[in-house]
Amino acid sequence: MDIAPAIRLRDLKKTYVVSERESGLRAALASLIHRRKTEVRAVDGITFDLAPGEIVGFLGPNGAGKTTTLKMLSGLLHPTSGEVSVLSYVPWKRDRAFLRQITLVMGQRNQLVWDIPAADSFELNRAIYRIPPADYRSTLDELIALLELEPLLAKPVRNLSLGERMKCEIAAALLHRPGVVFLDEPTIGLDVTMQRRIRTFIAEYNRRTGATVLLTSHYMADVEALCKRVIVIHHGKLLFDGELADLVQRFTAHKTIVVQLKDCAADLRAYGEVVSCEDGRLTLRVPKAETARVTEQILAELPVIDLTVEDPPIEEVIEHVFARGAA
Amino acid sequence: MRGLADLYLQQLKTGVASMLQYRATLLIWLIGNILEPLIYLVVWSTVSRSIGGSVGGYGARDFAAYYIVLMLVNQVSFTWVMYEFDYRIREGAFSAVLLHPVHPIHADIAENLSSKVVSLPFIVAAAAGLTAVFHPAFKLTLGMVAAFVPALALAFLVRFLVDWTVALAAFWTTRVTAINQIHFMAVLFFSGQIAPLTVLPRPLQVVATVLPFRWTVGFPVELVLGRLTRAQVLTGFAAQGAWLLAAALLLKFAWRVSVKKYSAVGA
């Protein structure tokens, strides 16, 4: 039996009309009379489904249309054309029952009241979302434990560090236990430890509540840790939708061969592109199709102590995908 | 209904807590709210004395009474939502508000009320001080005070809804400050702040009767000072009721259109 998707997009498009003018006083005066308008296609025909409970990484370079898509999914933006449904609601109608079941966390925006302790903002959200007191208490206790919020609760939000504030933002956004969670760069600007803590938390929240999560991030570690499936967009168009492992397979033209030799004396340039060599540990980049042949050759011709074949780091793959999309 | 009452209570608590964080700002703001009517009071008292005792039916002590009550009424009905909207739209802070499953006007009303809870004791103290200095001619009757309470509540509601609707202009233009300026000038003139309306030329009085502003400031003041006939009091309440209805309908419509516009052009 097919389960209805939690999120469904069909040929979704969003076109902005922006006025533009050249620099300088003359252009400024001219723009008083006549404004030149151009259309910007922020999202240009995107189609995908998310099954209930999935965590999906939504990737693309800056300006690819990720945030615009998330805003259409959360009901902040009205699409130019196409269909969207989230939990069977049409987001832009902003039905209250719909708004009670979703959340959008934007790493660079804050929703907490700046001058008062986070605990007071939580209490305010309880009233806004009309969370029954018993549910509120248990969810809050759970969030406090998972995100280690106890020491932060009584401090005014403006006195918290960026990471501490982000943890409180996430807690505030999840108090009503949304079934669909949109996370726009939730770990931006945070240190590695805090990034890891937030990642672990997202995975745990998904496991406990079965929430559907769509996540954008520029940190590939986030994506690798959380998402089996990724959707890549560029210039508003879908470039890839599938498993992260397939993305690597499909878009990597090269593999990395790491060879451990006695020292760096041997010249391996004939086998492929030498990336580095340190204490006899030599990293070679070879075209994917050549990997088997080159490996065999190296093993036969050189005194190899150890040899491994690796996929390039995910950052490199993504960079490659973006570069292809831009071409 | 209980959910809404809970929301108001939480917003009030949050609002008061935020206000108390900025004591210096609160003080400066209070001084402004006291100084403005005080200046008009002094000017008009001086004018009336210099021309032999009365302007438009107001003597020096009548002006004192008028402006002391006006200070209190204006304190109750005053809003600053325009500045809030301007900021929200410019900074994209409106998105967070739109994600909430409740109409944003509730949060704004509650926040406005919370600032008044904090500042009202100071304004009442200032009114007592000015009464001691200027010996105003108060002729308060119990009936007038009883009628004053609903008039004041309606004044607050009408002004809030009108200001909130005008503030929606921020959705349409990024330079909403100019619109705010015009609005404030209109309020200053036609609400009875710059002068009691009976002092103004007749045509301006007629305009003031048609516009909402008089009913949000001048009317409750004149009412409690016993300057209105029974018929004028009833007309005033009718005007407040009509404006409340009109503003609520206008707001509902303007809000819907504005959100549509916001969601079309992006945050």
Image (cartoon, coloured by chain):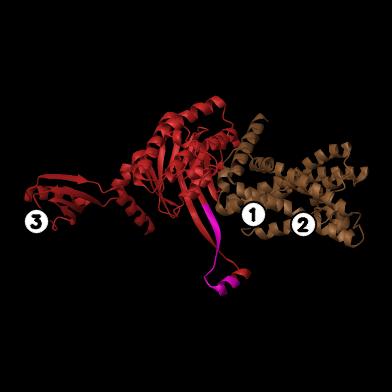
Chain colours: A red, B brown
Disc 2 is placed on an element classified as helix
User: Which residue has dot 3 on it?
Assistant: A265
Both on one chain, marks 3 and 2? no
Instruction: Determine the residue located farthest toward the top in the rendered image.
Output: A134
Disc 3 is placed on an element classified as loop
Indicate yes or no whether the magenta region holds residue A28.
Answer: yes
User: Which residue has dot 1 on it?
Assistant: B170
What's the residue type where badge 2 is placed? Ile
* Inter-mark Cα distance, 3 to 1: 70 Å
User: Which residue is at 48% across, 52% downward?
Assistant: A43
* Inter-mark Cα distance, 3 to 2: 91 Å
Residue A243: which disc?
none
User: Which residue has dot 2 on it?
Assistant: B39
Q: Chain of mark 2?
A: B
Can you tell which quarter of the image residue A211 is in?
top left
Q: Position of residue A308 (x, y in %)?
A: 17, 44
Q: Position of residue B81 (x, y in %)?
A: 66, 49
Q: Position of residue B245 (x, y in %)?
A: 78, 43
Can residue A87 be seen in the rendering of this structure?
no
- Range of magenta residues: A14-29
Q: Position of residue A122 (x, y in %)?
A: 53, 35
Callout 3 crowding tier (Cα within 10 Å): few <14, some 14–19, many ≥20: few
In this rendering, the answer to whether A186 lies above or below A43 is: above
What's the residue type where badge 1 is placed? Ala
